[in-house]
Image: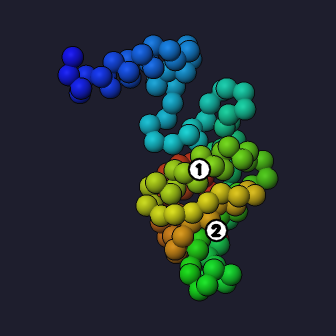
Amino acid sequence: MSMSDDWKDALAAIRAAVTPGEDDSARSADDGIEPTDTAGGPTDCVKAWTLEIIYERKGRGGHPATIMVCPQGMSDDDVDALAGTLRRRLGVGGSARGGEILLQGDRRDALRTMLPSLGFKTKG
């Protein structure tokens, strides 16, 4: 067995160990915010959420930042998943804390076009 086949065997073993209902077809391809029926996961109300977009420079040494204020009903897991998706798609740094998503730089225009494609409404 060559070294390049070792990872294939390890991957096959991991896939075999996945419990029913947790297969790859149940997961989204690039983010974890798709609506699902599972307890504790995102629900269909995701489609109705409005995210407020704010541009800010103060308190960061003059560096611009885009802040998104998430609604109260959005769980911390959903906020983290959305933040990760946005950071990957925009190729920027940032964080999610206390119901807010901070993205480095002025990303208002990109967010106004990207968020509706993810099913969110924007304000600001």
Amino acid marked by disc 1? Leu
Q: Residue 77: name its quadrant.
A: top right
The residue indicated by pointer 1 is 82
Viewer-side residue, 45 vs 74:
74
Marks 2 and 1, how far apart at CA:
13 Å
Amino acid marked by disc 2? Ile
Return the residue found at the far right. 72
Q: Quadrant of the C terminus?
A: bottom right
Viewer-side residue, 89 vs 60:
60
What coloring was used for the rendering? rainbow
- At which x and y percent is residue 34? 57, 38
- At which x and y percent is residue 53? 63, 68
- In the displayed structure, 71 sits above or below 33; it is below
Residue at (68% x, 81% y) in the render:
59
* The disc label shown at residue 38, or none: none
Decide if residue 122 is in sight here: no
Residue at (61% x, 76% y) in the render:
55
Viewer-side residue, 40 vs 5:
5
Q: Tag 1, which secondary structure?
A: helix
Q: Residue 12: name its quadrant.
A: top left
* The disc label shown at residue 67, or none: 2
Going by the image, does 24 lie left or right of 10? right
Q: Residue 52: name its quadrant.
A: bottom right
Residue at (56% x, 15% y) in the render:
19
Q: Tag 2, which secondary structure?
A: strand
